[in-house]
């Protein structure tokens, strides 16, 4: 998948809010959680300039079908045979696409 985004750097306040949320998410289940707000202010001030926070606004998303690229021939044949026996409207077209992509016809 390819995603083109517009980046916007976070302000220091936005970065601290993001870090607070992030640390909370990973610390809340710990036996003795250490939350961002509990860190000594001098440690935060000393290190915050080394962190770049940013927002991403997706502009374009492109999905790319790999269709079992890199699988060996026996595996590809097994997958396509299995797909062709399924009671699923997408299975047979997918099998055909895999065969076409991998020159199995």
Image (cartoon, rainbow, N blue to C red):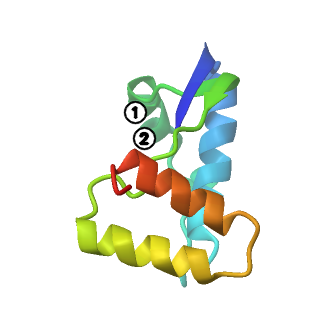
Q: Is residue 82 above or below residue 17?
A: below
Q: Residue furthest front?
A: 105
Callout 1: few (<14), some (14-19), or many (20+) C-alpha neighbours within 10 Å? few
- Observer-nearest residue: 25 or 37? 25
Callout 2: few (<14), some (14-19), or many (20+) C-alpha neighbours within 10 Å? few
Q: Is residue 80 above or below residue 85?
A: above
- Observer-nearest residue: 7 or 95? 95
- Observer-nearest residue: 59 or 11? 59
Find the distance from the CA under tag 2 to the CA under tag 1. Answer: 6 Å
Q: Visible in this render: residue 81? A: yes
For this view, does 73 lie left or right of residue 77?
left
| Residue 37 spot, x, y in % from top left | 63, 51
Q: Are marks 2 and 1 in contact (CB under 8 Å)?
A: yes
Instruction: Give the residue pinned by disc 1.
Output: 47
Q: Quadrant of the C terminus?
A: bottom left
Label 1: state its secondary structure: helix
For this view, does 76 lie left or right of residue 83?
left
Q: Which mark is residue 43?
A: 2
Q: Is residue 13 above or below residue 30?
A: above
Q: Visible in this render: residue 35? A: no
Q: Residue furthest left?
A: 72
Q: Nearer the viewer, mark 2 or mark 1?
A: 1
């Amino acid at each position: 998948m390819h995603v083109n985004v517009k980046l916007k750097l976070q302000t220091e306040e936005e970065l601290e809010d993001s870090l607070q949320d992030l640390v909370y998410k990973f610390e809340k289940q710990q036996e003795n959680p250490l939350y961002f707000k509990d860190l000594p202010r001098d440690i935060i001030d000393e290190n915050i300039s080394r962190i770049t926070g940013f927002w991403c606004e997706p502009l374009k998303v492109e999905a790319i079908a790999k269709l079992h690229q890199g699988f060996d021939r026996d595996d590809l044949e097994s997958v396509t045979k299995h797909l062709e026996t399924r009671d699923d409207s997408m299975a047979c077209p997918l099998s055909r696409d895999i065969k076409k992509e991998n020159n199995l016809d």
